[in-house]
Image (spheres, rainbow, N blue to C red):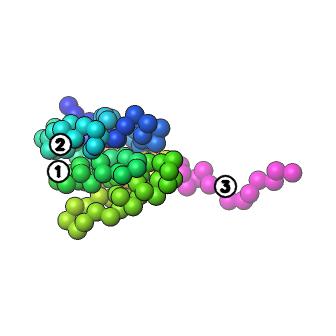
Amino acid sequence: MTAPIAIIMGSQSDWDTMRHAADTLAALGVAADTRIVSAHRTPDRLFAFAKGAKAAGYKVIIAGAGGAAHLPGMAAALTELPVFGVPVESKTLKGLDSLYSIVQMPAGIPVGTLAIGKAGATNAALLAAAVLALSDPALSDRLAAWRKAQTEAVAERPEDKA
């Protein structure tokens, strides 16, 4: 059986960011497939993956990309599945180029755009899990427990470091 979530990225270097999505999903007990699917260097692979994603059993796609960041938008253009785009921080423009590319999708081709970098990858995983949790009570409970633990980890008062 195919994992319900696919995490795709444009290159191996994107894994430093996208592993945070995979780690978050693993912590929630949600299976995910990870693969490199470059919009520019492997367009045939992208087309085959995105066109066949729904039939393969995926429910949500998390797509991370840096630079021109066409991967999330192209994936969204080729599938009916929800696509969450994670801008990967670039050296040239610190990820702003990626963010602008992903967030400027034309009407009719939605991509849920997240923050640049680790926070975006983590939140993309949480959003994907929330989508699945709508029809999975056990996952809904795990997600609620995860969020409760996040809340409880915030101290009420600052520690005295003197």
Percent across and percent down for residue 14 are 42, 40
Res 152 label = none
Residue type of the residue flagged with mark 1: Leu
* Residue bearing the label numbered 3: 155
Q: CA distance from mark 3 to mark 2?
A: 47 Å
| Element marked by disc 2 | helix
Compare residues 85 and 90 and report the one nearer the observer: 90
Foreground: disc 3 or disc 2: 2
Q: Is residue 154 magenta?
A: yes
Q: CA distance from mark 1 to mark 2?
A: 7 Å
Horizontally, residue 141 falls left or right of residue 151, namely: left
Query: What is the residue that sits farthest to the bottom in this orientation?
Result: 107
* Residue bearing the label numbered 1: 78
| Residue pictured at 22% horizontal, 61% vertical | 109
Query: What is the residue that sits farthest to the right in this orientation?
Result: 162
Compare residues 116 and 24 and report the one nearer the observer: 116
Residue type of the residue flagged with mark 2: Phe
Q: Earlier in the sequence, mark 1 or mark 2?
A: 2
Label 1–label 2 contact, CB within 8 A: yes
Res 47 label = 2
| Residue pictured at 29% horizontal, 48% vertical | 71
Q: Earlier in the sequence, mark 3 or mark 1?
A: 1
Residue type of the residue flagged with mark 3: Ala
Magenta segment boundaries in residue numbering: 144-162
